Image (cartoon, rainbow, N blue to C red):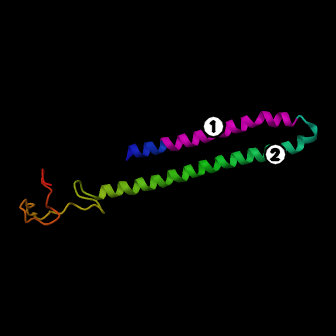
Amino acid sequence: MDRWRGLKDLVQDAVDHGSRAVERLQKHAAKLPFDLLEQIPPIAAPVRGIRLVHDTMVSGVHVAIRLVNRVAGYTIDGVLFVVEQQQQKEPAGTPGEGEASAPDAPDAPDAPDAPDAPAGRRGTERGSP
């Protein structure tokens, strides 16, 4: 279970840090065009508003990504906890719930090779027409 928890933590951290890095890059990539457009007096005020909307939306998307990531992490922690509890309850070597042990098959009679074999079995021997 420790390996699964470690993998979950690793993926969760990667998503969180990746989201923060992408958010910074997206805002930085938009900075130059907004800065240039704000230099034009007639459109400077609307451009500032658009920049604010842009930055707010980018931040909102990444906050949502990190929130879903966190909730997924809590959910996986819960699942791992339940699985761990089930494993501790079951003695080693016994099938778990939902697992069926193979029933002892009754001794099946040998398949007849004689010509009076059932129709589905006739002609299955090698070399038979």
- The residue indicated by pointer 1 is 21
Q: Nearer the viewer, residue 4 or 129?
A: 129
Q: Is residue 102 above or below residue 55?
A: below
Check disc 1 and give the amino acid type: Ala
Percent position of residue 36, x then y: 84, 33
- The residue indicated by pointer 2 is 50
Q: Is residue 100 left or right of residue 124?
A: right
What secondary structure is found at the residue carrying circle 2? Answer: helix
Q: In which quarter of the image is residue 48?
A: top right
Percent position of residue 18, x then y: 59, 39
Q: Is residue 89 above or below residue 26?
A: below
What secondary structure is found at the residue carrying circle 1? Answer: helix
Q: Which of 30 and 126 is in front in this view?
A: 126
Q: Quadrant of residue 16?
A: top right
Q: Residues within 10 Å of mark 2 (few under 14, many from 20)?
A: few
- Residue 58 got which mark? none
Write the residue at 50% across / 50% down.
Answer: 73
Please say whether residue 83 is one of the residues in the magenta stretch.
no
Percent position of residue 91, x then y: 24, 56
Check disc 2 and give the amino acid type: Ile
Judged by depth in the image, the label closer to the viewer, 1 or 2, is: 2
Task: Provide the major secondary structure of the magenta segment.
Answer: helix
Q: Is residue 122 left or right of residue 96?
A: left
Q: How crowded is mark 1: few (under 14 residues within 10 Å), some or many (20 or more)?
A: few
Percent position of residue 30, x then y: 75, 37
Q: How far apart are marks 1 and 2 (CA)?
A: 22 Å
Question: What residue range appears in magenta?
Answer: 10-38
